[in-house]
Amino acid sequence: MADQREQGAARPAAKTPAAAGRAIRVLLVDDHQVVRRGLRTFLEVQGDIEVVGEAADGDEGVARAGELRPDVILMDVKMPGTDGIEALRLLRDAGNPARVLIVTSFTEQRTVVPALRAGAAGYVYKDVDPVALADAIRSVHAGHVLLQPEVAGVLLSQEHPTGNGRGNALTEREREVLTLITDGRSNREIARALVLSEKTVKTHVSNILMKLDLADRTQAALWAVRHGVGD
């Protein structure tokens, strides 16, 4: 991937409209220096993305995230000491608002599912096209759940007893809210779209998770995709 990044750096990216405002602040967390160097080389020529720091393991990544307050963290899963999944839990427990995009070579279901349950906003493989990676950063920063097609396939091919047969328990309004969650909308955006208060939307989201026996919005979005809600 480092070679791809260096090749991509040969032609500086055109400034995007977002570059006129504050750039997306990105922290790189990976135990391989060559990977961090490749990511930095490519991302630093993006007009709307700024690499604000690096870390070589989960513990350092959590500490640096607290110091630098990045918007997006690119995180590997398998690292010595504190791995990416435990780092995700530590970030969540600390209330750090950064959106975490997992960038890894591990494709197993046993890695994907725990990462999403721990709070990852997206999951892509290290062979992702550099331009697609930049777009993924922008997407998770905008509040979307981003899964590479192969990752979504791994998840949606599973048999999930959790939530099966419970979709009928949702009210029409809850299904509308769930559809917008699947589109990556925030509570505020859902409130505006449905002309509701944010407090009412939060109540609907809580009811959806309770009725489907799901832990978070990411699981709700995946459930909705699997069961065709909003199609």
Image (cartoon, rainbow, N blue to C red):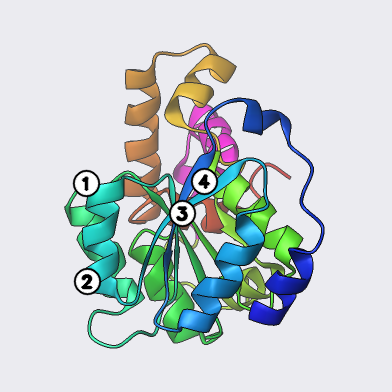
Nearer-N-terminus badge (2/4) = 2
Left or right, 175 with respect to 94, comes to: right
Three-letter residue code for mark 3: Thr
Q: Residues within 10 Å of mark 2 (few under 14, many from 20)?
A: some
Magenta span: helix, strand or loop, mainly? helix
Q: Which numbered tag is attached to residue 168?
A: 4
Q: CA distance from mark 2 to mark 1?
A: 16 Å
Q: Which numbered tag is attached to residue 59?
A: 2
Three-letter residue code for mark 1: Gly
The part of the image, by quadrant, that contains residue 180 is top right
Q: Are marks 1 and 3 in contact (CB under 8 Å)?
A: no
Q: Nearer the viewer, residue 170 or 151?
A: 151
Nearer-N-terminus badge (4/3) = 4
Q: Nearer the viewer, residue 174 or 15?
A: 15
Nearer-N-terminus badge (1/3) = 1
Left or right, 209 with respect to 194, comes to: left
Tag count? 4
Q: CA distance from mark 4 to mark 1?
A: 34 Å
Q: Nearer the viewer, mark 4 or mark 1?
A: 1
Q: Which numbered tag is attached to residue 218?
A: 3
Q: CA distance from mark 1 to mark 3?
A: 17 Å
Q: Are marks 4 and 3 in contact (CB under 8 Å)?
A: no
Q: Examine the rendering and report whether any part of residue 166 can be seen.
A: no
Range of magenta residues:
165-182
Residue name at image x 36 percent, y 58 percent: 119
Q: Nearer the viewer, mark 4 or mark 3?
A: 3
Nearer-N-terminus badge (2/3) = 2
Three-letter residue code for mark 4: Asn
Nearer-N-terminus badge (4/1) = 1
